Structures are given as structure tokens and as C-alpha cells.
Image (cartoon, rainbow, N blue to C red):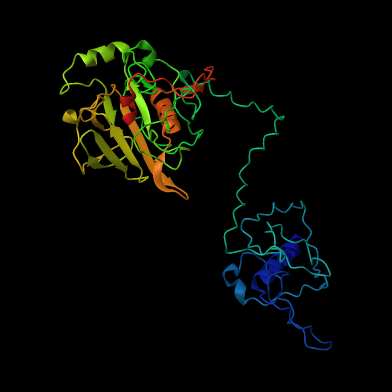
Amino acid sequence: MMTTRWALIAASALALAACDAVRVPGDGREAPAPIPEGAPGPPPPMLPVTNPQDGADDVNEMPAVDTSDPEPVTEDPVETEDPVEPPAEDTAETPTEDPVDDPDGPTEDPVDAPVEDPVSEEDPPSDTEPEPDPEPEPETEPEPEPEEDEPVVSPPPPPAQEVKFEYFAPGDLLPGSGFGRADDTIYAPEMVFPIKSAPTFLNSQVYRPGGGVGGDQCDVSNYSYPWRDNFCETRTSNRTTPLCSLNKVHQGQDLRTGTASECLQMRAQTPRERGLHQAVAVEDGIIQYIGSYSLKLKGSETGFIYSYVHLNMRRLQVSAMDTVKAGDVIGVVSNDFGGTPTTYHLHFEIKAPVEGEGIVHVPPYMSLVSAYERREGGIGRVVEDETVAVASVIDLVDPSWLID
């Protein structure tokens, strides 16, 4: 019985090793065509061998074994006194293959052997590397929740500018001195003030102390506020402008400089030396004309003609046709008037184009107010005139002062 068992095991192993026609499911080969009935079958199996190791080197030459329910081979049992148990099967020496799927089941006790997992057709191997996992999207910071509407705080208003001086309204002339022009136009809004740094007071040179009414020009009242316009003041000379209601008028504005004590100091100077306070160019331009007691500057931006009268003509800092910048020193304030007496002051004029009139003398009063505010870094304040006119004409002691 033992011999028969070993013979069957050996024959099955040899048949499995030598059979290439058996199709293993999933090996990719086509299944063999079915054998029709009556076709000659495979050769009969070999007789069992006594030693299972005999012929192990020629297993490929052994015929295939029919695995379809062969009739058991019987031999006469060999009587032994002590039946010997077969030794444990050594699977390491027995060549193994994947078991054959047989619909009729295994022929005999199959040889135990490790079986590799068949490759699934649904998950075929891939020669390409697996795609990397997509990079996670960068986390975005959550949008801050809108804060509650805060009350809008308006910026504080700029601090009020300091009042630097006071002045009467334009056209408000001294009673009896003429009929002024109530014109608040700033004809030269960008001009520099014509006196470089000295305190300056705008008022009449004829109808104030030291002029035609008598008194001393160095009177303290002449060096005080408020300012007063004197464009269109009455004169005896035939000077006129269409912006004044009468002919024979004053065509500019008079400016006293410094203080009453400085007025006395100038009186002590010789005519050649006289002058303490500098006059400057009010605009970039060219010195267009220099006369015996006057100088004219033509502005390069506006084309206006600015006249400076009563400078010390011996101490001028410019010559005719010189170009100057706004703020350049051109001379000093004095009282040159060709031998005719006058006070220490600057007579300042502006000639500008006026629609329908051409280039004419215009009131310089409000242009001077604006320029002085810029120079002083403060503002001027308009004051009410409390003077009551008691006469249409001031009683002049010396009418000769009316020639300018």
C-alpha cells in the first residue's frame, strides 16, 4: 500500500512539471480546443516506479499523466509484521507548480506547496510611476469680519491765523482828499511785497502830517495802523486813469517804512547816503526803465509794469535792462524827487491790462494787503472807518504838495 502511494505522488509531480498544455486561469494564453468524443486519448500511464527519485533528472521526457479519475492500481498487499509509517513529506525536495484547476477535483492527495497570488486582470501591473498626490491648496486666511462703522471724525480746523495789521476798506480815502475806488480786486495775487523786511504803513503823503496840512512827517501818527488807500487822491497835475471817477488823480499807493525814530535818523543822513530800508523786485522780470527819480520793472510772467518812485537813485542795485528775480534788492527808500520836496516814502504803481480799457493804472491797494499778509505770515483785518467828513476839501497849508 505504501509503495503504491509513493508511486502516485511521484507520477503526479512529474506530470505537473512536464505539462505545458494545461491552462492556468489568468496566464494570458488561449484555452486549448476541446477534444471531440472518440478521439484517441493520451498514452496510458507508466507503471509505478519503485524509487520516486529515479529519473528525476529526466522528468521532462516522461509522458503526461491522465488526471481524470484513473482506476486505482491494486497490488497484492505485502504482509509485514510491523507496518511502518511513511516518513513526513519533505516538500523542499519536491518541485512544485501552481495547482491545476480541475473541474473534477484533485486526483490524489495534492502536494502541499506555497501558491503565489494570481495577478488580477482588474488591477494589471503598471510600468509608469504612480501619480503623486496633488499638493494641498494653500490655506487662505479667513477674511476679517467687518468692523462696526466707526464714527467719522472730522479733522480739527486749522488754527486761526494771527492778525498782523489792520486796514480800512479799499476806496475809503481820507475825507476831503478825493473820491476813491471801492475795488477789492487783487490784480497781482502772486507778487512779493516791495519792502523787504521793514514795518510798512500805507497812507497819504499829502493829507497827513508833514504834507500839505503842515506838521512833521516823522509824527508817530504816520507810523501806525490802520492802513488807508490813497489811489485816486486829488492832485493838481494832469495825471489820470479810467478807473478813477475824476481826472488829476494819484495813480498809485504811498508807503512809509520803518518807525518814527528811523524817520528822524534818515533826516540826519546826507541825500547821497539817505536810506535805511531796502526795496525789492515784486516779480521776476527786467528793469525796463530808470529815470531821474523812478524805476520801472516789467514782470516776465504777467507783463505788468511796476513803478518805484522816490528811491535813492545814487544807491540803486540794478541798471536798465538787468534781469531780476522776485525778492532781489533793487535799491533803498528815500525821498528823491528831482529837487522838489517830498516825504520819505515809496510811491508804488501797477499798470495792467483791463478789459475795454487797455493797459492802465490799476489800484495796487489790495495786492499790497495780500502780499504783506504773506510776508508777515498772518492776516490783515478790515476795520470800520469812524471818521466823519466835515468838509469836501481839506484846507492845505502848502498846495505845492499836490503836484505828485
**Residue 72: where, in percent of width, then height?**
82, 70
Of 359 and 98, the residue lying toward us = 359
Above or below, comparing residue 109 to residue 296 in the picture: below
Horizontal side of residue 82 vs 209, given as left or right: right
For the image shown, how many numbered marks are present on the structure?
A: 0
Horizontal side of residue 126 vs 270, given as left or right: right
Above or below, comparing residue 195 to residue 19 in the picture: above
**Residue 372: where, in percent of width, then height?**
40, 26
Please say whether residue 60 is visible from this viewpoint.
Answer: yes
Of 159 and 317, the residue lying toward us = 317
Location of the N terminus by quadrant is: bottom right
**Residue 25: where, in percent of width, then height?**
73, 69
Above or below, comparing residue 327 to residue 32 in the picture: above
Please say whether residue 195 is visible from this viewpoint.
Answer: no
Of 306 and 87, the residue lying toward us = 306
Horizontal side of residue 202 vs 129, given as left or right: left
Q: On the image, which quarter does residue 99 sit in? A: bottom right
Horizontal side of residue 310 vs 30, given as left or right: left
**Residue 115: where, in percent of width, then height?**
69, 58
Q: Residue at x 22, y 15 (%)?
A: 267
Q: On the image, which quarter does residue 31 sit in? A: bottom right
Location of the C terminus by quadrant is: top left
Q: On the image, which quarter does residue 316 sit in? A: top left
